[in-house]
Amino acid sequence: MKRLLITGAAGGLGSMCRTRLAHMAETIRLSDISALGDAGPNEEIVQCDLGDAQAVEALVVGCDGIVHLGGRSVEDRWEVIRNANIDGVLNLYEAARKTGGPRIVFASSNHAIGFYRQTEHIDATAPTRPDSLYGVSKVFGEAIASMYHDKFGIETASIRIGSCFPEPKNHRMLSTWLSADDFVALIERIFAVPVLGCPIIYGVSDNQATWWDNSAVSYLGWRPMDNSEPFRPRLDAAMGTPSADAPDAIYQGGGFATDGIHET
Ligand code: NAI
Ligand code: 15L
């Protein structure tokens, strides 16, 4: 690739990708609403709000690929979600349509299906069951990706990321954990395959107790290598196992499912 755009590059995953995806293009364009520091040797920095359509159109010009991580990453008031994750996603796809249709990785979330119970096993064909306005915004993003694929041929991989942190932070995350290595390997495969289409992928490592079936995307050749089990003893010692009636032990999306609406 000549130029890869990473949005949300000041965030947790964006900072990791800034380093770990540097090899993927001659130039990495990094964007966020927050400051990103100085540009490195093969970097370009564009600070903008995803809710600003004109700025996003300029942001996407000249990009062959996009890793879209930018946006509100947890539940919030609707106006915050709407600006970053609804208007922001539409602005990104409109910009992509007008500038040649780069391949896109969309950071969706397990909260698009967070109301499924942990006793249920689902694949990408399961109806969405968002657990929050945040989860609804991720369903919207997946729908936009589908429409821009059907109508304009723009290819997107929507990754329903579980919990991508250096370590699982609680017992639920033993099932949802995605290691940075597995995430990076997945993004590499998404840009390597000749034909991507518009798949929904569960972004989860090779954990012992998993709820999600990725067999529909075996054509990507992605084999997650990491497993959360080594973290279990430390979590047991630090917090004990959650009681059976705790949201974190019932719902795939954990506490997002019982959190209320964040009113203005
Ligand atoms: P984060 O909150 O650390 O990073 C998100 C970045 O987006 C921030 O740097 C923020 O400044 C930027 N941003 C927010 N609103 C913006 C706007 N209006 N315009 C431009 N930039 C804006 O989140 P994290 O953990 O790095 O997640 C990245 C993406 O992956 C998010 O879209 C999140 O929803 C998704 N995701 C992450 C998971 C995880 O376990 N880390 C799990 C599931 C989904
Ligand atoms: C997400 O979608 C969030 O962005 C992240 O901060 C975690 O809460 C993650 O889901 C999770 O469910 O663990």
Image (cartoon, rainbow, N blue to C red):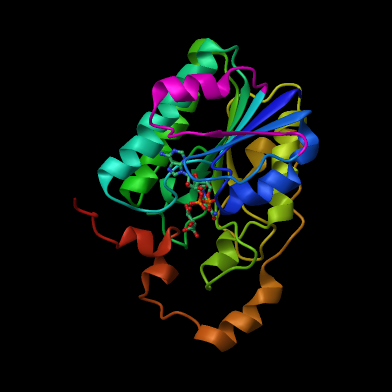
At 27% from the left and 41% from the top, the residue drawn is 79
Q: Quadrant of residue 231?
A: bottom right
> Which residue in the rendered view is the most extreme toward the left?
264
Compared with 53, 100 (above or below) is above
The answer to whether residue 149 is visible is: no
Where in the figure is residue 195, as x and y percent of width and height? 71, 21
Q: Is residue 58 left or right of residue 42?
A: left
Where in the figure is residue 72, as x and y percent of width and height? 41, 46
Where in the figure is residue 94, as x and y percent of width and height? 46, 18
Magenta segment: does it hold 37?
A: no
The answer to whether residue 97 is visible is: yes
In magenta, the rendered stretch is 41-64
Q: Nearer the viewer, residue 145 or 95?
A: 95
Q: Quadrant of residue 115?
A: bottom left
At 52% from the left and 20% from the top, the residue drawn is 58
Q: Nearer the viewer, residue 130 or 75?
A: 75
> Which residue in the rendered view is the most extreme toward the bottom?
237
> Which residue in the rendered view is the most extreme toward the front?
38
Q: Quadrant of residue 9?
A: top right
Compared with 253, 198 (above or below) is above
At 34% from the left and 59% from the top, the residue drawn is 257
Compared with 240, 144 (above or below) is above
Magenta segment: does it hold 53?
A: yes
Compared with 160, 248 (above or below) is below
At 54% from the left and 18% from the top, the residue drawn is 96
- Screen quadrant of the N terminus: top right
Where in the figure is residue 77, as x and y percent of width and height? 27, 49
**How many numbered discs, if any?**
0
